């Protein structure tokens, strides 16, 4: 049954100009404006669209059109406590007044988007790859211009929590910054989640899965899975898996990463490859920021660092890592990093992970993740910081 067939014949419905002929035989069918005008007229039209929504029981929107009034209507409907999604087919969305049970909407728990056929190619070519899921993959070559080598598919996300997993491998890489995997909506205007990729995370040239958590405050349209490259290596892209979280516990925020583009260098020096070298200055942070707003909940910050001894038998604290809020006024957690706190598994060279767990108690807090007091006995380097939400104590991760 089509989306239109599921709407009662006498129900008031709002839709777009190109869909209207399919419902025009209904006495209570209404159509959205088709263009924008002056600022004053647009304010009047905005109020008019609100009046239209208030007067209907159904709204059928084709989000692929991407016009101003369709997107405004979608934002209003998706935020409204009076409407819920009754059904959707790709980017055609049917809202119904009083619909609150999203479990009745038929959509898969897991979707797979193959790079060579379901996503759009920026800089790259389709190549045969025996280890790829379908035998084909996209290769973005070393030396390519900076930009997105993969994007799309402009899909619709309804539920509040997902995991996105990128399957890829890299070749001919060093330790530094390679690119970013990100999830966006609204034709790239809103970045929902992102994961910077560094060469030290790929100790071999085999296939690797990189996952990020997605937390949504409302349904999102025109969702893309993008891969950005700086041209530092060959990036071979197989597929993106989208997995709907059955239990959204622990998805109060999306995963994100911070590196030299997001952090304030402070007393650190940024070198080639997007790596920060910490300079030893007492009581001054080597880096600080990024002043990132987080809702209440538990979090895990993973710092990717390299500590190279400068003196024989170097020991003792390497540096202090901390999480603070409100521009350093309130400490959330800290760790004086020693050799036993460095975890090298799965990383190349002398790179290691240091984990710092903290909790935000405020409804929303502006958080910093800092490195301070680096030891003079080590050359300390920072690649990037991965920030992930954690479920509350006593509940299992999904």
Image (spheres, rainbow, N blue to C red):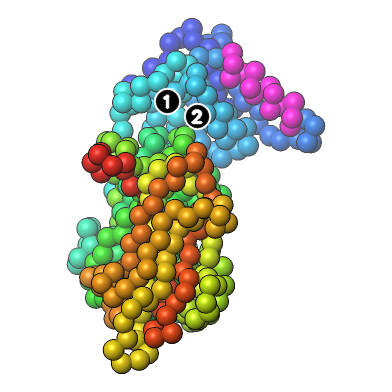
Name the residue rendered at 79%, 36% in the picture.
38
Relative to residue 198, is residue 52 depicted above or below? above
Relative to residue 83, is residue 381 depicted above or below? below
Q: Indicate the position of residue 398 as horizontal and vertical percent values.
A: 25, 42
Q: Indicate the position of residue 302 as horizontal and vertical percent values.
A: 36, 62
Name the residue rendered at 43%, 11% in the picture.
8
Q: Residues within 10 Å of mark 1 (few under 14, many from 20)?
A: many
Q: Confirm or deny contact between disc 2 and disc 1 (CB under 8 A).
A: yes
Does 49 appear in magenta? Answer: yes
The dot on residue 78 is 2
Q: Indicate the position of residue 81 as horizontal and vertical percent values.
A: 49, 21
Which one is nearer the viewer's eye here, 174 or 248? 248
Which one is nearer the viewer's eye here, 240 or 258? 258
Which quadrant does the N terminus fall into? top left
Q: Residue furthest bottom?
A: 312
Mark 1 or mark 2, which is nearer the start of the sequence?
Answer: 2
Disc 1 designates what residue? 85
Name the residue rendered at 33%, 47% in the picture.
390
Does 330 appear in magenta? Answer: no
The dot on residue 273 is none
73 left or right of 39 in image? left
Relative to residue 71, is residue 4 depicted above or below? above
Instruction: Specify the segment rendered in magenta.
Output: 42-55
207 left or right of 272 in image? left
Disc 2, SS: helix
Quarter of the figure with residue 245: top left
């Amino acid at each position: 049954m089509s989306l239109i067939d599921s709407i009662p014949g006498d129900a008031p419905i709002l839709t777009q100009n190109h869909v209207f002929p399919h419902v025009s035989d209904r006495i209570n069918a209404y159509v959205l404006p088709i263009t924008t005008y002056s600022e004053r007229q647009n304010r009047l039209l905005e109020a008019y669209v609100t009046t239209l929504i208030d007067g209907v029981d159904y709204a059928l929107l084709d989000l692929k059109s991407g016009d101003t009034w369709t997107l405004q209507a979608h934002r209003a409907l998706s935020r409204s406590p009076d409407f819920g999604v009754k059904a959707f087919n790709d980017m055609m969305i049917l809202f119904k007044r009083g619909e609150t049970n999203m479990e009745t909407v038929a959509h898969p728990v897991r979707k797979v988007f193959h790079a060579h056929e379901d996503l759009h190619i920026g800089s790259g070519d389709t190549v045969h790859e025996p280890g790829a899921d379908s035998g084909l993959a996209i290769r973005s070559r070393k030396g390519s211009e900076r930009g997105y080598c993969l994007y799309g598919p402009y899909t619709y996300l309804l539920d509040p929590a997902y995991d996105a997993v990128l399957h890829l491998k890299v070749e001919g890489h060093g330790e530094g910054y390679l690119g970013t995997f990100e999830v966006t909506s609204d034709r790239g205007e809103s970045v929902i989640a992102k994961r910077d990729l560094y060469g030290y995370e790929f100790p071999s040239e085999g296939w690797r899965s990189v996952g990020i958590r997605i937390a949504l405050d409302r349904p999102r349209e025109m969702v893309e899975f993008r891969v950005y490259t700086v041209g530092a290596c060959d990036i071979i892209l197989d597929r993106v898996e989208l997995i709907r979280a059955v239990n959204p516990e622990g998805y109060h925020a999306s995963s994100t990463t911070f590196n030299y583009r997001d952090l304030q260098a402070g007393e650190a020096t940024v070198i080639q490859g997007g790596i920060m070298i910490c300079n030893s200055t007492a009581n001054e942070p080597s880096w600080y920021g990024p002043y990132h707003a987080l809702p209440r909940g538990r979090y895990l910050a993973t710092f990717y660092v390299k500590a190279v001894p400068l003196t024989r038998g170097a020991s003792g604290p390497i540096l202090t890592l901390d999480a603070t809020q409100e521009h350093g006024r309130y400490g959330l957690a800290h760790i004086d990093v020693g050799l036993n706190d460095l975890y090298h598994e799965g990383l190349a060279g002398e790179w290691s992970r240091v984990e710092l767990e903290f909790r935000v108690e405020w409804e929303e807090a502006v958080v910093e993740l800092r490195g301070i007091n680096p030891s003079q006995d080590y050359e300390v380097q920072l690649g990037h910081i991965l920030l992930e939400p954690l479920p509350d104590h006593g509940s299992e991760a999904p």
